[in-house]
Amino acid sequence: MAAEPGRVMGIDYGSRRVGIAVSDPLRIITRGLGALDNVPGLIESIAAKVREEQVVLIVVGMPFAPDGGPGAKGEEVGRFIEALRAQVTVPVGIWDESFTTVDARRAFIDGGMKKRKRQQKGRVDEMAARVLLQEYLESTSHS
């Protein structure tokens, strides 16, 4: 999934909300761009963020089933990826998102975030996008 130098966007797809994060141009750190409601117009909103942030590659978290296949949720994510590819001009790849939500919740706890704030679903979705994007960046920085 090599791409030209520049920002990478990470997307944590959910049936209700979609968490979005982006890297810096050097692909060292990530920052959250929030969570968007999964409603009509979602793809267009993401495409606008791709243009605004000058993203050169998108990585979407894929929830693989225990047997390694896509499972029902994975098929939904696959349809989302195809719709996204039709709307953007940058490559769209997948990344194994196993445990990103668990890791996001753990990051909040380790950071001392109060339980009330941790329970705000959009925060978890955004952090899950950051976690999967950071994992992707770390895996590609050694190649």
Image (cartoon, rainbow, N blue to C red):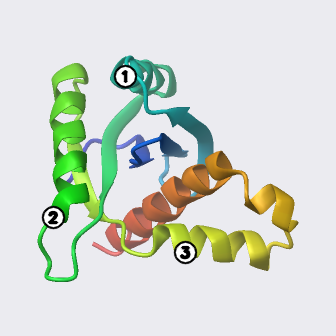
Instruction: Give neighbour class at mark 1: few <14, some 14-19, many 20+ (Cα, 10 Å).
Output: some
Q: Is residue 103 left or right of residue 79?
A: right
Residue depicted at 35% across the width and 75% down the height: 142
> Residue 115 appears at what percent x and percent y?
83, 67
- CA separation, marks 1 and 2? 25 Å
Residue on which the image places disc 2: 70
Q: Rounded to the nearest whole Å, what is the CA distance between mark 3 and mark 1?
A: 28 Å
> Mark 3 or mark 2, which is nearer the start of the sequence?
2
Q: Residue at x 15, y 64 (%)?
A: 70
Crowding at mark 3 (Cα within 10 Å: few <14, some 14-19, many 20+): few
Question: Position of 37 compared to 142: left or right?
Answer: right
Q: Quadrant of the N terminus?
A: bottom left
The location of residue 96, given as percent across then percent down, is 29, 68
- Residue that mark 1 sits on: 47
Q: Is residue 8 above or below residue 1?
A: above
Percent x, y of residue 137: 42, 63
For the question of whether residue 30 can be seen, the reply is no
Name the secondary structure under disc 1.
helix
Name the amino acid, label 3.
Val
Residue shown at 41%/48% (left/top)? 14
Image quadrant where residue 69 sits: bottom left
Element on which disc 2 rests: loop
Q: Secondary structure at mark 3?
A: helix
Q: Nearer the viewer, mark 3 or mark 1?
A: 3
Image quadrant for the C terminus?
bottom left
Question: Where is residue 109 drawn, in percent x and y?
Answer: 77, 76
Mark 1 or mark 3, which is nearer the start of the sequence?
Answer: 1
Q: Label 3, on which residue?
A: 102
